Amino acid sequence: MKNKTRRDFLKKSLLTGVGLITLPEILRQSTFAIGSPNKLIQFAQIGCGREGTSDYEGTMKHTDLCRMVAVCDLDSRRVDLAKKTVEEFYRNKGETNVDVKAYHDFNEVLARPDIDAVIVSVPDHQHAFVAVKAVLAGKDVYVQKPLTYSISEAIALRTAVRSRKIILQTGSQQRSEKPWNTFRIASEAVRNGRIGKLHSVKIGIGIDKIKGVKPLPQTPPSTFDYERWLGAAPEQPYMEFRCHPQDSIDGRPGWITTEDFGLGMITNWGAHHMDIAHWAMGLELDGPLSVVAKADFMKDDVWTVHTTYHAEMMYPGNIQVILDNKFTNGIQFEGSDGMVFCARGSEKVTKSDPVSTVDDKKGPLFASNDKILYPRVGSEGKIWMPSADHYRNWLESIISRKDPIAPVDQSTRSLEACAVAWIGMKLNRKLTWDAKKEKFVGDKEANAMLSRKARKPEYDLTLLMKKAGLV
């Protein structure tokens, strides 16, 4: 079936013969899992590293909703391991004839009409290109945070998603109940005025430390397609410390700390925490008015991102958002009548995630007054409908054709805020941002940093958008 036809089939198969039962009731009863496997959402994993493994394992466990049928990675060792892991998962459930296809080229995955959706867990600099291609192929998409590498890429992906009516979930898992409900509780308290008039938001996102290794070109392993991995990023020799570990999928990859591939903690953890800040402020589709920022950047090292940083952004409503490496990893909201703090605590998404250093006595959620944390549902209008599981929420949204809990429009704004701060850090002067036009006011140098030129035409997102008639 073509993708739109399969989507209609999946949705209609839920409703056939169930009368007036509502969609949530159907999902709980898992009625559509009975019968043909075609009634399940068939998905593939693109990018089988640390985050990718966590993503597909978190998704494929929902066997009443989905079936994993393919894996893809530019590192043959990683894709082979993923294939083995997935096949063992289904065999352990009693299946005997399991065949998960392994791919090197993600375009081959997108060409399969039987695949309904893909998870994109590639490095940040490849997010937009792979995700847009998936959208143009008619696939629903789960893409890791930050949504994209640059602001122009985020706008392009949003344009493609809305134009083609695709369901996209961003990996902003702090919006969902598991494993963290602290962020929902705190954001509800703020948005419903329990701390009075909000005036300050203090965000700690941790700090990257230099590797202490000089850049040293190496020969790429025969098992790794470095040329395609490099994609649109600037031409440069292969260095394992700038890509991913060759002996493990659990180790923190070096591209996270290499500015050509990821912008550092300002977007790495920043995308998570800025997303929650926007949620609590009620500014999910807005952005800062101005930014003043400074940072130190790694020099003469194999890694290149920022280390120490301080950024101050003014938001509508005279709310000041401050990011500083000295703050505890988490978000502190301060208002006229009190404060509330939220963080992850000891929970991790992947094995190598850092643990938040929160006050052991206070924990990952506390307020100046305990009553701030108690929801008053009867009198409050802004109460989030909890998403118990981020991956399941995506799958349910694919069926209902309703936006998931972390939709593309809002994740675009989270990325924009982080990238605006990064540009301020690079230029070290005050910048004025127009959130409506999504560009800086009267600053050509800053606006030139909203995008970057692709290394080769075949990796040029703008050309891809033009060919699709979206520019």
Image (cartoon, rainbow, N blue to C red):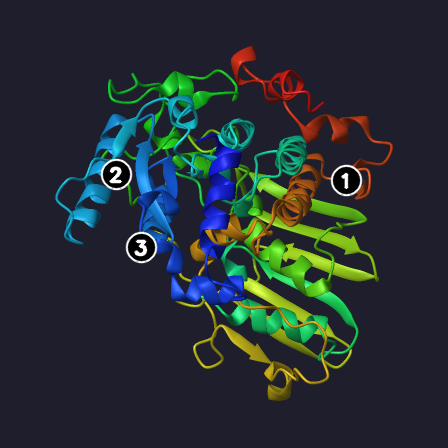
Residue at (21% x, 49% y) in the render: 89
Q: Position of residue 379 (x, y in %)?
A: 73, 84
Q: Residue at x 20, y 42 (%)?
A: 87
| Position of 207 relative to 343 (above/below) | above
Q: Residue 332, relative to residue 284: is it above or below? A: below
Amino acid type at mark 3 = Lys
The Cα atoms of the two marked residues, 2 and 1, are separated by: 46 Å
Which label lies toward us, 3 or 1?
3
Task: Give the crowd class for mark 2: few <14, some 14-19, many >=20 residues within 10 Å.
Answer: many
Which residue carries the number 3 mark? Answer: 61
User: Which of label 2 and label 1 is nearer to you?
Assistant: 2
Mark pair 3, 2: CA separation? 15 Å
Rendered position, 219 above or below 184: above
Does the residue at mark 3 contact the one at mark 1 (Cβ under 8 Å)? no
Horizontal relation, residue 317 to residue 218: left or right: right
| Quadrant location, the N terminus | top left
Mark 2 or 1, nearer chain start: 2
Mark carried by residue 82: 2
- Does label 3 or label 1 sit earlier along the sequence? 3
Residue name at image x 82 percent, y 37 percent: 437
The answer to which of marks 3 and 2 sits earlier in the sequence is 3
Q: Which residue is farthest top?
A: 457
Tell me the kind of residue under disc 2: Ala
Residue hosting label 1: 429
Q: Residue 48's mark?
A: none
* Mark 3 crowd level (few <14, some 14–19, many ≥20, 10 Å Cα): some
Q: Position of residue 387 (x, y in %)?
A: 51, 64
Foreground of the two, 365 or 24: 24
Q: Position of residue 451 (x, y in %)?
A: 66, 27
User: Picture quarter containing residue 347?
Assistant: bottom left
Q: Nearer the viewer, residue 101 or 81?
A: 101
Q: Where is residue 35 drawn, in percent x and y?
A: 31, 51
